[in-house]
Image: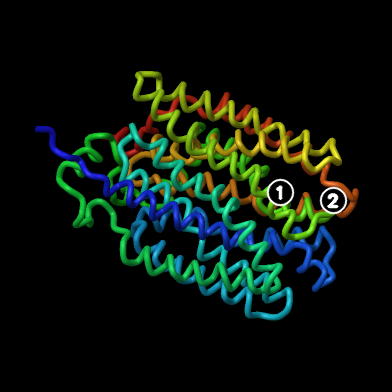
Amino acid sequence: MKQRIGNVRWGIAFLIGVGIVINYFDRTNLSVATKPLMQEYHLSSAQFGWVLSSFAWSYAILQIPVGALLDKIGVKWLVRVGTIIWSLATFMTAAVGGMGLIILSRVLLGVAEAPAFPGAAKATGYWFPLRERGLATSAFDAAAKLSNVIGVPLVALSVTQWGWRGGFYMTAILSLMYAVAYWIWYRDPSESKTLTDAERAYIVEGGAQESGEAPGGVGKNLGYLLGRRKVWGLTLGFAAYGYTFYLLLTWLPGYLETEMHMTVLKSGMYTIVPWIFATIADIVIGGWLVDFLIKRGKNPTRVRKTLLIVGMVLGLAVAGAGFTKNPQIAIVFITIALSGLAFSAPIGWSIPALIAPKGTVGLVGSIMNFFNNLMGILAPIITGYIAGGTGSFGLGFLIAGIVLLIGILCYLFLLGDLEPIQSPYKANV
């Protein structure tokens, strides 16, 4: 009789996914409150672009140090501490007075949430065999899109009912509840008491990454990885995705409120449409379809790279939104773009665990996410200056399309196959 494997790993995937949903509530609440905040503090679009980017200042800077810490001390403790601090930072945003303190709160939020995505990618590498990596990765990546489906209207309703501070208090309470849940339930496979021997063997034999730090130290490993063309292909391609993603994450509600003259609540309802399609595409194409094709015997590199690039090509539709004043048409273009980018993203996030030498998954993921989040700084600021200077978001959307085109070329000509990078220590044996 065949031994039952068990599904503890999927419970972990669900726990991580819930955390990313709440994590993105805290990121999008500021964008939903664009109009009331700009009015209360008398800010121009260019000034508010700096406010929107403030979260990414600390978040981006800390990505590489966080990746090193994830490889050194592991996922559990770093994310535990981070969830508590990000809850407090969100409470602080609601409680303080003055735009300077709000910006400080957002910077603190960026510090606290820095381990979230690289930690999720590393945990997925620990917990899932290669044949399930696509769906497992999309479980947390799609959560970032689903968060906008749930969070944008929820925060918009809170802002409408209780003012912009009410939206922040609501998300802060949810964040604190998650901090407690993560503390109780997350363990690495090596520590889990609920994991059966059969499931543990299934995970290990399927090619899951082993926990533990790489030899050689952070500086040497970082220098080695930064000298690999494959790492740069992944990093620059994913950064191009990040530019459009962060533009829409931060400015889409504000774009609808200012250029399309919608109320906060109406813009919230329009905003969820592309994020619904993005969530579905992320799970079905970036997750299930990738695993399905690989299980059917298709070449894993060809499957992942083809869908990765097709998604980026669809992302070019964002430029079309710059050539219309009709909100329905604009949302169609944005929906096509976000759906394509959504299913390319989990493929991108699965690659660090596929190509990194043992013990450096967190570092590779953090190099990638550092440059991705530099785009999180640049996209809101550049778009804010464009909207303020021209009175339109059109040129901002066109620039996003150009950046995506550069990213496609990096994926095509720099990334190469998705086989593991040889460890420098093995090479010297």
Q: Residue at the location (66% across, 80% down)?
A: 96
The answer to whether residue 39 is seen in the rendering is yes
At label 2, counting other C-alpha atoms closer than 10 Å, the crowd grade (few under 14, some 14-19, many 20 or more) is some
Q: Residue at the location (63% across, 50% down)?
A: 374
Quadrant the N terminus occupies: top left
Q: Is residue 366 above or below residue 352?
A: below
> Tell me, what colour scheme is on the image?
rainbow
Residue 187 placement (x, y as % from top left):
29, 58
Q: Between 379 and 374, which is closer to the camera in this rendering?
A: 379
Q: Between 164 and 209, which is closer to the camera in this rendering?
A: 164
Number of labels in the image equals 2
Q: Residue at the location (54% across, 48% down)?
A: 369
Quadrant the C terminus occupies: top left
**Residue type at tag 1:** Tyr
Query: Could you say which disc has been placed on residue 270 in the image?
Result: 1
Q: Is residue 425 above or below residue 258?
A: above
Element at label 2: loop
* Residues at circles 1 and 2 in contact by the CB criterion of under 8 Å: no
Task: State the CA–CA distance, disc 1 to disc 2.
Answer: 14 Å
Of mark 1 and mark 2, the one earlier in the sequence is 2
Residue 420 placement (x, y as % from top left):
37, 32
What residue does disc 2 label? 259
Q: Is residue 353 above or below residue 80?
A: above
**Residue type at tag 2:** Glu
